[in-house]
Image (tube, helix red, strand yellow):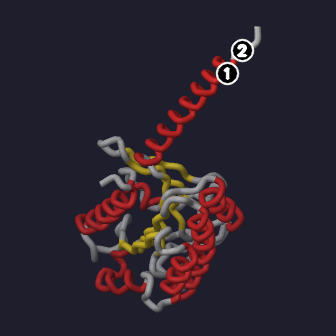
Amino acid sequence: MPDSRDQRRGRRRVSATVARGRERIADLVQHRYPTVAVTGMTGVGKSELVDHLCGRESEDGVPESGSAVLERRVRRGRRLRGFRFRVVPGENAATRLGALDEVFHDDPVDGVLHVVANGLATGRRPAGTTGALQVDREEQLARELEDWTVTAHRIAAMAVRRNRPTWLVVVVTKADLFADSVEEVVRSYSPGSGTPFGDRLDELRALAGAAKLSIDVLPACSHLESDAITPAQRDAYLAALEARMGQLAGHV
């Protein structure tokens, strides 16, 4: 016996109710655990930073993963809130570009931590080589800028097509290596600073629209490489970063 019109309408109402319920659950999960892309060139300390934000201590001397698969980690707080991190590998160019497309196009994120190191990124020795590794700071700064330019294009493309705002925090790591000039260095990575990096941020803000993209710049220090900063000062930097992320995510 064919279904009556009322039965068909009833099924449609049930399906619509189930669909709305699923959307509400998805929105709740997204609000409690927003997805954050962690980008930046190799050697700046992306994995160490996320280890600390997730409450895990990194082992000294362990290099960043160059895996073809995004590093995925979750931070869960006591109030059932946290972040889902997607750490983009920084070494292999093809892998990195594919991962950037995934986090900014295929499965867009809610926020971005872009990590820089003031030209002090840890050098990566080519396979099969030995001896002292010389790292040229000016070359590292140029690579940072190139890496940011590639990433910024993807952030702008994502921000303009989304209905809700996206946030970006530029995290300046290795603050213990320039402890006497932290404020000056942070300013050099900020919008309106007149530096090459600051100019790129101004361009990004113009492309995405200030209402669609908020930008913060904060110092951080995960693994202490000098005694210029104490563990307590390091923890204070990380706490300030966590607090700002919580504000941006609507957790506080």
* Residue 132: quadrant of the picture: bottom right
* Count of numbered tags: 2
**Which disc is residue 8 wearing?**
1
At a point 40% along the width and 48% down the height, the residue shown is: 75
- SS at mark 2 in the image: loop
- Considering every residue shown, the one lying at the far bottom of the view is 194
Disc 1 and disc 2 in contact, CB within 8 angstroms = yes
- Amino acid type assigned to the residue bearing label 1 in the image: Arg
The reply to whether residue 171 is visible in this rendering is: yes
Between 226 and 20, the one lying in front of the other is 20
**Which disc is residue 3 wearing?**
2
Task: Using the image, determine if residue 162 lies above or below residue 12.
Answer: below
**Spot occupied by residue 120 in the image (x, y as percentages of width and height):** 47, 79
* Residue 223: quadrant of the picture: bottom left
Between 50 and 177, the one lying in front of the other is 50
**Spot occupied by residue 18 in the image (x, y as percentages of width and height):** 55, 29
* Residue 95: quadrant of the picture: bottom right
Q: Quadrant of the C terminus?
A: bottom left
Q: CA distance from mark 1 to mark 2?
A: 7 Å
Q: Left or right: 233 with respect to 116? A: left
**Spot occupied by residue 197 in the image (x, y as percentages of width and height):** 51, 84
Between 54 and 222, the one lying in front of the other is 54
Near mark 2 (Cα within 10 A), the count class, few <14, some 14-19 or many ≥20, is few
**Spot occupied by residue 70 in the image (x, y as percentages of width and height):** 59, 53
Looking at the image, tell me whether mark 1 or mark 2 is earlier in sequence order.
Answer: 2
The reply to whether residue 135 is visible in this rendering is: no
At a point 46% along the width and 68% down the height, the residue shown is: 168
- Considering every residue shown, the one lying at the far right of the view is 1
At a point 50% along the width and 57% down the height, the residue shown is: 110
